[in-house]
Image (cartoon, helix red, strand yellow):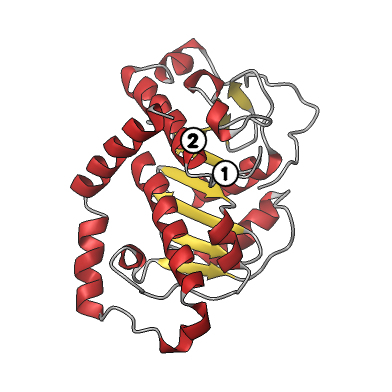
Amino acid sequence: STILEHSERSPSMSQATNIHSIAKWNTAECIELKAKLAAGFRIIARRRMDDGIAGHISCRVPGFHDMFWVNPLGLFFEEVTPDDLLVVNLDGEILQGKRPYNQAAFAIHATLHAERHDVMAICHTHPPRGTAFAALGMPLKMLDQNACSFYEDHALVTEYEGVVATKEMARSMCAGIGKKRVAVLQNHGLITLGASIEQAVIDMLDMERTCELSLGVLAMWDRVIEVPREAALQSKAVFISRTRLQLQWDALVRQAAKA
């Protein structure tokens, strides 16, 4: 979340890491994923959903269950390039990269990647409307087809203990998220856990839109007519389909490139 710096330890490489491992981080697949991850930061920034140098997006390194890329401490989302991304393991060692990391980023992403092997990418930020809605301590309602993307797949984490400085604090968040794909973090912000970078980023955009609509009807919250179950399931299938995610992602990348 916010600005808690990595310890005084400088970025270093564990003794177990060797040249063979480094080569695996720089395959064509890895280069493509790092480019996508950097694009994700630009997309979030273009929508003004970032929060200064707080917030983070991570992606598991292919072939490694205990390593992930994450943005370093001190850069705005719009500044992050593929070369800036750190490779960090679950013990907190920086295996590749020249900057320190945000301690909250390590605690949250290391804990979630360790617990959720179904997840490839995680996006966490404090977007204005999502954070405002989160302060209400209410779950989402299925207001429209966009919101239905999260039908029976979103959590409300009500325990806020301050900036997530430790893995113990992150485990509390993890327990609240459970097996859900996205979560509203009360008094904090939003988090999305995707099977791909595209899904994690697009889910964050869709969550922010849903929160904005929710705030718009808040005065009549008890009168909201939610989408019926069968229609919600049908809409969800369309919104999380690979085709929709890819088309939406391509359009977002084009849009961000024009910024």
Q: Is residue 61 visible?
A: no
**In terms of secondary structure, where does tag 2 sit?**
helix
Q: Position of residue 10 (x, y in %)?
A: 74, 21
**Residue found at the far bottom of this picture:** 223
| 12, above or below 184, in the image | above
Classed neighbour count for the residue bearing mark 1: other residues with Cα under 10 Å, few (<14), some (14–19), many (≥20)? many
Q: Position of residue 220 (x, y in %)?
A: 47, 85
Residue, x 43% and y 32% (percent of image)? 37
Please name the amino acid that badge 2 sits on. Phe
Residue, x 63% and y 62% (percent of image)? 172
Q: Position of residue 179 (x, y in %)?
A: 43, 62
Please name the amino acid that badge 1 sits on. Asp
Q: Is residue 131 left or right of residue 177?
A: right
Q: Quadrant of residue 224?
A: bottom left
Q: Position of residue 163 (x, y in %)?
A: 73, 53
Q: Which residue is mark 1?
A: 50
Q: Quadrant of residue 6?
A: top right
Q: Is residue 88 visible?
A: yes
- The tag earlier along the polypeptide, 2 or 1, is 2
**In terms of secondary structure, where does tag 1 sit?**
loop
Q: Nearer the viewer, residue 169 or 225?
A: 225
Checking the image for residue 41, the label placed there is 2
The answer to whether the residue labelled 2 contacts the one labelled 1, judged by CB atoms less than 8 Å apart, is yes
Classed neighbour count for the residue bearing mark 2: other residues with Cα under 10 Å, few (<14), some (14–19), many (≥20)? many
Residue, x 44% and y 52% (percent of image)? 204
Measure how far apart labels 2 and 1 are at the Cα level.
9 Å
| 163, above or below 52, in the image | below
